[in-house]
Every structure is written in C-alpha cells, then in structure tokens.
Image (spheres, rainbow, N blue to C red):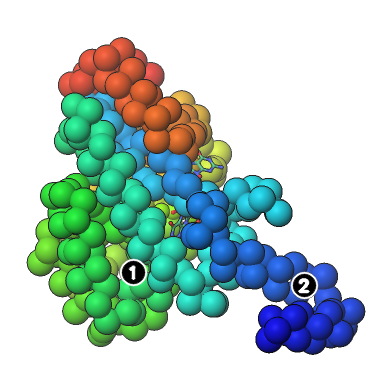
C-alpha cells in the first residue's frame, strides 16, 4: 500500500520533472532490483606485457543488461549506484564474481594471471573494505597476489590521509593497487610516491593521439620514465592501433590493454582467447608487430 501511495506521489510530480531526471529516477528504481534479478554480468579484458608478449591478467568490467532498458553502459549507471549507496552491494558482487572467475580459470589450468577490479570511492571509504576483500579472497580460495584493485585519482584525493592508511591495509593483505585513468586528475607522481601503489594505468585520452599529437607523446613517455623511476608498473589503456603499440613498446611501457588486443569478453570467450593467444604467440617472444 505504501508502494502504491509512493507511486501516486511520483506520478503527480512526474510532469514537472525534466526528461533526464525522470530517466535517472526510472534507472535508479530498476537498478535496485538488478542483483535479485541477476541482470549484472562481468566482461573481462586481457592485458599484455610488451617485453615477452604474455597475457598478464584481465580487468573485470561490469555489464548491466536490463529487461526494461536494454544494455546500459557503466558510465550511465555507476554514478546512480554511487548516489544511492547500492554500489557497496554491487561492488562486493563484482569483487566476488571476478575472483571466482579467475579461480575457475586456474582450476582449468590457466594460472599466473591477475584480475583487476574497479573500486568506487564509497567502497574505499567504507570502514571494513579491507576486511571485505580479505573475506572474499578467503571464501573463493584466491591468493591475494592474484588481485589488483583499480582506484581513480579522484578517489585517492578525496580523503588523502584516510586513504593512505586504507591502501596500506590492502598492501598488508598482499593485493596490488593501481591508479586508473592516470593523467585525468590532479595528482602528481610526486604525490603518488607517498602512496603504496604498484601500477599506474595511463588514460586512453593520452593514448588516442599518441601518433599525431607531440604533446600527448611527450606526456606519455615522461609518465612512463617517471613511473619507472618510482618502481611502478605502467599500463597503457585503450590501445587500438599498431602505431600506438610501437610507440609504447619503444618507450618501454610495461603493458597494454585495448581493442588492439581484445575487447572486453564474456568469461568463456576470454578464457578461450587467452589459451589461443598463449598457444599461437608462444610466450617469451616479442610481438611480430613490434619486433625490429
Ligand atoms: P575503466 O576502468 O577505465 O575501464 C576501461 C574502459 O575503456 C572500459 O569501458 C573498456 O571497455 C574501455 N576500453 C578498453 N579498451 C578500449 C579501446 O581500445 N577503445 C575504446 N574506445 N574503449 C576501450 P566500460 O566497460 O564502458 O567501463 C567504463 C568505466 O566504468 C570504467 O573505466 C570504470 O571506471 C567504470 N567501471 C566499470 N566496471 C566497474 C565496476 O565494476 N565498478 C566500478 N566502481 N566501476 C566500474
Ligand atoms: Mg579500470
Ligand atoms: Mg581507465
Ligand atoms: Mg576511463
């Protein structure tokens, strides 16, 4: 009854709401039910080490296929999930599902990979998140070394002191920490130096015009050099062309991720891709595309 009353109230004000607000309200409502309905899935996108052309791991990317609204991009629903606090529940589901998938692959004989999981600011600020991570790893039976958490610069800047302590707790567990979308925020490598980070992922925005824009090329090569001097692993995001690949290889970028290698794939397709790659490529040799 309360529900019906709520709906009547909503309808009455409906006309006054602009379309965007209405769509957001409808989506938030639908989002509330996604976990129960099983509408969420994970896609996995592989990462490649340039030095020896080995697949090093995958990034788990959330997908929502809504019965009512069709495919909805993470950029459109993750902000809503954050506003409503649902991201805590969804984020824990993502973490568990990602770890379970990697564990399953290990049981199918594909080992030595890491899985990277995107973490939202709300998850990080939650008091017991390191405990949640430890519990999930224990439940699934996955070694902490196989998990990397991806945090954006804004997440890290939001609450610098609290964040540093949190990050130490993750490192103490043994999971790796990556800065996602590096270069889009305001943090400097000097600031990052004080955090126990293991990897930085250079944002696609800098990779896109690498071959045409001398400034993006300069930024990228400088970031790689500075990151290496701080002992960090460097991943380039959104690599689509062989020209980008060659530039990154010449400038000693450690790993790449992007459509040049593979799109985000469903778990079965991704496992098949990794097996085929490993077989066809033969680990330990450089890619033909970047061999001198
Ligand atoms: P991100 O973590 O930076 O993920 C990389 C995004 O770039 C993904 O978009 C991926 O599909 C896309 N991408 C990868 N390679 C290429 C390429 O070569 N070309 C192009 N055009 N795109 C490429 P997606 O899956 O739409 O995710 C967007 C963002 O949503 C992610 O950016 C991440 O910030 C967020 N996100 C995704 N899954 C989760 C999640 O489980 N939790 C949280 N909190 N955020 C997530
Ligand atoms: Mg990411
Ligand atoms: Mg990114
Ligand atoms: Mg991005």
The residue at 35%/50% (across/down) is 97
User: Between 259 and 222, which is closer to the camera in this rendering?
Assistant: 259
For numbered disc 2, what is the local secondary structure?
helix
Q: Which residue is mark 1?
A: 188
- What x and y, as percent, mark residue 241? 50, 30
Q: Which of the pair 244/72 is nearer the observer?
A: 72
Q: Which residue is mark 2?
A: 22
Point out the tag, 2 or 1, that comes first from the N-terminus: 2
Q: Looking at the picture, how far across and down is residue 180, in whole percent?
A: 38, 58
Q: Quadrant of residue 1?
A: bottom right
Nearer-the-camera pick, 207 or 270: 270
Cα distance in 3D space between marks 2 and 1 = 39 Å
Name the residue located 15 percent from the left edge and 57 percent from the top edge. 138
Which residue corresponds to the image point at 39% horizontal and 47% vertical from the top-left?
A: 60
Q: Few, some or many C-alpha atoms within 10 Å of disc 2 (few <14, some 14-19, many ≥20)? A: some
**Left or right for 71, reference 218:** right
Farthest right residue? Answer: 15
Q: Nearer the viewer, mark 2 or mark 1?
A: 2
Quadrant where the C terminus sits is: top left
Residue that protrudes farthest toward the top in the picture: 280
Tell me if residue 36 can be seen. yes
């Amino acid at each position: 009854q309360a529900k019906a009353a709520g709906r009547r109230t909503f309808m009455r004000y409906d006309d006054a709401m602009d379309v965007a607000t209405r769509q957001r309200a409808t989506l938030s409502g639908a989002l509330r039910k996604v976990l129960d309905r099983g509408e969420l899935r994970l896609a996995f996108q592989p990462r490649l080490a340039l030095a020896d052309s080995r697949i090093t791991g995958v990034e788990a990317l959330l997908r929502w296929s809504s019965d009512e609204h069709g495919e909805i991009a993470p950029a459109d629903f993750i902000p809503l999930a954050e506003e409503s606090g649902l991201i805590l529940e969804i984020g824990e589901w993502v973490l568990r599902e990602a770890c379970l998938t990697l564990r399953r692959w290990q049981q199918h004989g594909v080992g030595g990979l890491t899985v990277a999981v995107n973490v939202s600011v709300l998850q990080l600020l939650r008091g017991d998140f390191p405990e949640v991570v430890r519990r999930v790893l224990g439940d699934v039976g996955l070694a902490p070394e196989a998990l990397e958490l991806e945090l954006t610069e804004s997440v890290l800047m939001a609450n610098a002191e609290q964040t540093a302590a949190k990050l130490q707790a993750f490192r103490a567990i043994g999971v790796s920490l990556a800065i996602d979308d590096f270069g889009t925020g305001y943090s400097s490598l000097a600031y990052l130096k004080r955090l126990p980070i293991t990897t930085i992922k250079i944002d696609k925005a800098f990779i896109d015009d690498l071959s045409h824009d001398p400034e993006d090329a300069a930024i990228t090569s400088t970031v790689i050099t500075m990151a290496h001097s701080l002992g960090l692993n460097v991943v380039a995001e959104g690599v689509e062309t062989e020209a980008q690949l060659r530039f990154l290889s010449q400038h000693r970028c450690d790993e790449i991720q992007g459509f040049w290698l593979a799109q985000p794939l469903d778990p079965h397709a991704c496992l098949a891709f990794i097996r085929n790659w490993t077989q066809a490529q033969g680990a330990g040799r450089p890619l033909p595309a970047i061999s001198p």
